[in-house]
Amino acid sequence: MLAVLGIMTAGIAIVWLELPKLRKLGMREKASFYTFLAVSVGLGIAHSLRLPVPNPLDWIAFVYKPFSNWLFGLLT
């Protein structure tokens, strides 16, 4: 539980430090900043609670597996 509190504190500190710069930016930049921050804080909390966090490499392997099978079929 202490790790979750630390991650939340770090997220709040990032917003506090970046707030003067964010005021000068447009709406799209603010939305992307807050979206990426929320996703990263959420993944950090999930990892600290030892929840299963999806691995992007698994998704890439799933997409390229049919091409890989086709290519190996040509080579054998």
Image (cartoon, rainbow, N blue to C red):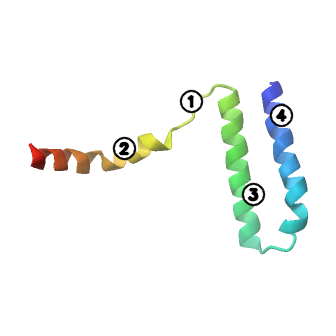
Q: Secondary structure at mark 3?
A: helix
Q: Secondary structure at mark 1?
A: loop
Which-is-in-front pick, marks 1 and 2? Answer: 2
Labels 1 and 3 touching (C-beta < 8 A): no
Residue that carries the numbered disc 1 in the rendered image: 52
Q: Earlier in the sequence, mark 1 or mark 3?
A: 3
- Which percent across, then down, holds residue 54? 53, 37
Distance (Cα) linking label 4 and label 3: 18 Å
Distance in Å between CA atoms under marks 4 and 1:
20 Å
Residue bearing mark 3:
34
User: Cα distance, mark 1 to mark 3?
Assistant: 23 Å
* Image spot of residue 52 (x, y percent): 56, 30
Is residue 76 found left or right of 26 in the rendered image? left
Residue under the image location 72 percent in, 49 percent down? 38
Mark-to-mark CA distance, 2 and 3? 29 Å
Q: Which mark is residue 61?
A: 2
What residue is disc 4 on?
6
Q: Is residue 58 left or right of residue 4?
A: left
Q: Amino acid at mark 3?
A: Tyr
Tag 1: Cα neighbours inside 10 Å, few (<14), some, or many (≥20)? few
First in residue order: circle 4 vs circle 1: 4
